[in-house]
Image: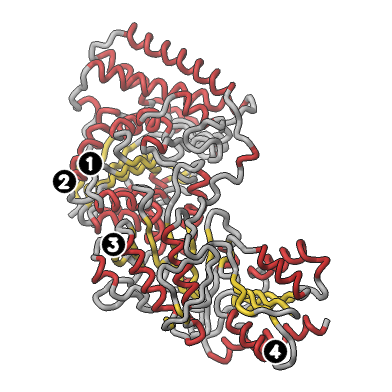
Amino acid sequence: MTQTVLGHGMETTQASGKEELKRWYQLMHMGRVLDEKAPNYLKQAIGWSYHAPCAGHDGIQLALGLSFRANKDFLFPYYRDLLTCLAAGLTPLEIILNGISKRDDVAGGGRHMSNHFAKPEIGIQNVSSCTGNHALHAVGVARAIKTYGSDAIALCSQGESSVSEGYVYEAINGASREQLPVVFVFQDNGYGISVPKCDQTANERVCDNFTGFLNLRIVKCDGKDPLDSMRAMQQAIAFVRTGAGAAIVHADCVRIGNHSNSDKHELYRDEAEMAAAKALDPLPKFRRYCLEHDIPDAELLEIEALNADQYNTASDTALRAANPDPASIHDFVLPDPWISPLFPGGVHDEKGASLTMLQAINQTLKEEFRLNPDTYIWGQDVANKDKGGIFNITKGMQQEFGKTRVFNGPIAEDFILGTAEGFSRFSDKIRVVVEGAEFADYFWPAAEQLIELSHDYWRSNGQFCPNVTVRLASGGYIGGGLYHSQNLEGWLTNTPGIRVVVPAFADDAAGLLRTSLRSRGVTVYLEPKFLYNSILSKASVPADFAVPFGKARVRREGQNLTILAYGTPVHFALEASEKLAKEGVQVEVVDLRSLSPLDTETIFASVKKTHRALVAHEDKLFGGFGGEVAAQIAHACFPWLDAPVERVGSEFTPVGFNRILERAILPNTDKLLAAARKVLAF
């Protein structure tokens, strides 16, 4: 069960060697120099517009940074961890380059917010501003550490108030259940911006909320005291190294100044409280400790003078450094995808036996898992004996590939996707597939983790690319009603940094999935669940068939009207075109397949040929993806249009459970026919 260890304080902790104490003081003093100089850059309109002071957290940050092993461990700092990152291996110059957002900032080339320090090349991770969500990433990489038998450790740092976030509980629950090598460090300064911790939790220390967790050791310490903090870190790491589970280090700190340079603590702290906080300053206290342990004042003064010189040199160099190039903004949005040498256009003439979409997805997953042993899948209900997901998409996979590669996650969508992001940090050769939710409608708890994934590559200036395929059973026509019939692509396609694909036939389902699993980057793979076992989607699937991203497929040639569709409405379009053909109207049906990137070349060529366009999709008409397609056509093809671009989608209501209501809300063949005749009659 949970083990709790209390701190003892500096005065009863065995002193370190003199040279080590001098090194600690040098780092603590340099951290304070940088911390106190940071606001000056903003005052001079140079930069560092976000600065969260680390003063008062000196002990735990020094201990955490020194506990990190460069090029071995994975350190996830938070925005207050200036001293942590300095002690872990960043130079003063690298700290300042980040603060003033220069091109050579090793965290991300000025792309990320100031005071978000990182150095991915040595293992200090580029972490988002979303407080505490990197706890999931730390757990994910810790799972990979355990999977691959590494002796690395994941170190996750955050403020105590961020522990109120649900995904932190999910992270610690998962680390405890899986007995993962991760140390969570809570830096408790009593405030979440202006919110006192008594408004966050009933316990005086938030770590006590986790005392019932198995396989978890809790160590408490004085975070103002570097020696007691080092004791706590060493005890936590020693426990984690046994393989018995994860650890929490709870460090009592003090916030001497404002939360950040945009906060005025005078509005909620009186003078007595601020004076009491300043009196607890760890730096002068540790200086006195050094003097008491036979380090002459002259040596400490020499350290301080050298730090001042080093800071001045670093600052002068940083001020002369180049700014980011505005022409670089499109670099590292997405990596180049894998392209099949056999099927570069994503078409084939195979005439063999047909598969359902469900069979094609299951078969392709197994083929890719056999090909690449560094491929993994997890999600809700994906691997329990003979059951392979709610639709049996993953049937037989755990039996063939084992529980290490195919396993269930808890019913926690944030955890499922967040650990995928972290797991992929361990090695670029890894490919992760997750069922992001049992139905697309349940994906919303994981939405912020998808946003993380979407800008990881760009935010890190190309230093980290999460290789994750997110599978979601999407859409209606199954009588599912609310939470079982929703489409998300209107939101998804407005998010740079992810690919969004939607197959309508079994062959494209296989081809798009294969390309996703062999490509670097993030792909959201939307599976129209109505088509899983539908005869409409059955198709022959050639061996090793692949469909490139951003390549539509003309399903039917025509001269009078272009219908552009994806997913289930592709079949409505084909049915409508058959009926219109009997009336002498030849409709060209274009299956978009890939929404982001979008094949505008094929779209424009078809519209310029037919001079009329109808866009059909299952999602809401208002605000749906069809509006973007129509806008693209209006912009590029206006001189060729003989009629306004028409759209068909679902009504602007939730999807009803009763089949009568569902039919009234969702598009169908008759609705497409009516819209097509309207365009043709214009």
> What is the CA distance from the residue labelled 2 to the residue labelled 3?
23 Å
Which mark, residue 242?
Answer: 2
Kindly identify the amino acid type of the residue bearing the numbered disc 3: Arg
Q: State if disc 4 and disc 1 touch (CB < 8 Å).
A: no
Kindly identify the amino acid type of the residue bearing the numbered disc 1: Ala
> What is the CA distance from the residue labelled 3 to the residue labelled 4?
50 Å
Q: State if disc 2 and disc 4 touch (CB < 8 Å).
A: no
Circle 3: element type: loop
Crowding at label 4, few (<14), some or many (≥20) Cα neighbours within 10 Å? few
- Who is closer to the viewer here, 461 or 158? 461
Sequence-first disc among 1 and 3: 1
Specify how the rendered protein is coloured. Answer: secondary structure
Circle 2: element type: loop
Q: Quadrant of the N terminus?
A: bottom left
Tell me the residue that label 4 is attached to. Answer: 581
Which residue: 37% across, 13% down? Answer: 303
Tell me the residue that label 1 is attached to. Answer: 236
Sequence-first disc among 4 and 2: 2
**What x and y, as percent, mark residue 459?**
51, 44
Which residue: 51% across, 76% down? Answer: 349
> What is the CA distance from the residue labelled 1 to the residue labelled 2?
10 Å
- Classify 632 as above or below 295: below
**Which quadrant of the figure has residue 404?**
bottom left
Sequence-first disc among 1 and 2: 1
Kindly identify the amino acid type of the residue bearing the numbered disc 4: Ala
Which mark, residue 405?
Answer: 3
